Image (tube, coloured by chain):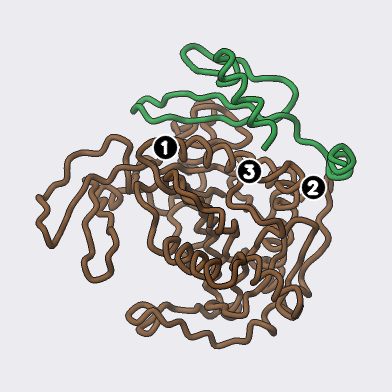
Amino acid sequence: MKDEVSAERGSVGEMHKRRTTLADGRYLIYYTFGDERPAARGSEEDESKRGPEAGAEAEEERRV
Amino acid sequence: MSELRWHPLLGEWVATATDRQERTFLPPADFCPLCPTKPGGFPTEVPEETYDIAVFENRFPSLKSDPPAPAVEGTELYPVRPGRGVCEVVLYTPNHTSTLASEPVEQIYKLTQVWTDRFRELGALPFVDYVFIFENKGEAIGVTLHHPHGQIYAYPFVPPRVARELAQSRAHQGTTGRCLVCDIVAEEKRDGRRVVVENESFVAYVPFFARYPYEVHVASTRHLQALTDMRDEELRGLAEILKAVLAAFDRLFDLSFPYMMVLHQRPTDGGAYDFYHFHIEFYPPLRTATKLKYLAGSETGAGMFINDTLAEEKAAELRGKVLPVVWGGGR
């Protein structure tokens, strides 16, 4: 049923998060959607690459 | 300076956030701080050249995760506490001239996933009791930046309006054994005159008790308490019905319709809220194409709203402006 709905409604791909820190210390999170994960840059964190727990979180995110 | 001062007459907290007086006010489009930073251009809040959806901590927050001590000492009558919480800005799109209504349904579906993620992450913070997701749209509402965006306030308490809904819902559950919003949805669907649009997972209606002429509520047909309870097809259904309602708003007077949009979900304070029911409320300030509904003496001073219109008539107007939502159909 879910696949039928998805096919009818189209797909946006999986959600990925990348957290960065701005110059004044505030955080900024980029959300991207698709099959390719964005590469983390420098000290930035790709939250889907932080180990098993983060992996479980990412899996949880995909199920929302 | 950011602190919470107790309002003893109403029994609620008031935030004082004096830094907010300095916030950017209606800048020209070339200097929008919410646009991606262009090569050689002035640095905005978003250093990269583009993004899909982005979330950042508000530069001018009412609440901070590490707030300063209050500027004044509290008393027994006037308690004061630090303004601890989180204020985020959610950028819906890098396109400065877009609106949520004009975004494709796919983008709104992405937004529902981001909202879900923010609800989960912020709600897990030990000092956050309530995650409030909302959008103020249009100068009539008082927005200071036109770039399409919403906000999230993560409060250290359950805000009074939601607390009142929770109390009413708990009382209804106690006397009838049923969910209040489930009963409202059933009543609106049974009557039908105030329903604007519905799909398999959600129904949008101008409630019987509307306080604003074009007030619309969007409720899930399944009894659930938060975005995190939703299945994927329900998030898609939510995106569809939001697109349908927002586009109908814009078609109503052939203008970009101003509104406040608020998501009412369960608190995140660890309590049991099975009796509560997720829904979204829209409060548009327009009563005609050129006239605003003001919150004047009765509304502000007494708390009694006076609606100059009939919900049944306004729902029929909106229903006549609803068009099918097509996935892959663009804007």
Q: Which residue is mark 1?
A: B57
Q: Which residue is mark 3?
A: B111
Q: CA distance from mark 2 to mark 3?
A: 16 Å
Q: Secondary structure at mark 2?
A: loop
Which amino acid, mark 1? Glu
Q: Which residue is mark 2?
A: B330
Which amino acid, mark 2? Gly
Q: Are marks 2 and 1 on the same chain?
A: yes
Q: CA distance from mark 2 to mark 1?
A: 30 Å
Query: Label 1: chain?
Result: B
Residue A13 x/y as whole percent:
75, 31
Chain in green in the render:
A
Q: Using the image as rendered, state which of residue B56 and residue B201 is in the foreground.
A: B201
Going from N to C along the chain, the mark reached first, 2 or 1, is: 1
Residue B39 x/y as whole percent:
54, 26
Q: Give yes or no for contact between labels 2 and 3 (Cβ–Cβ under 8 Å).
A: no
Which residue sits at x=40%, y=41%? B58
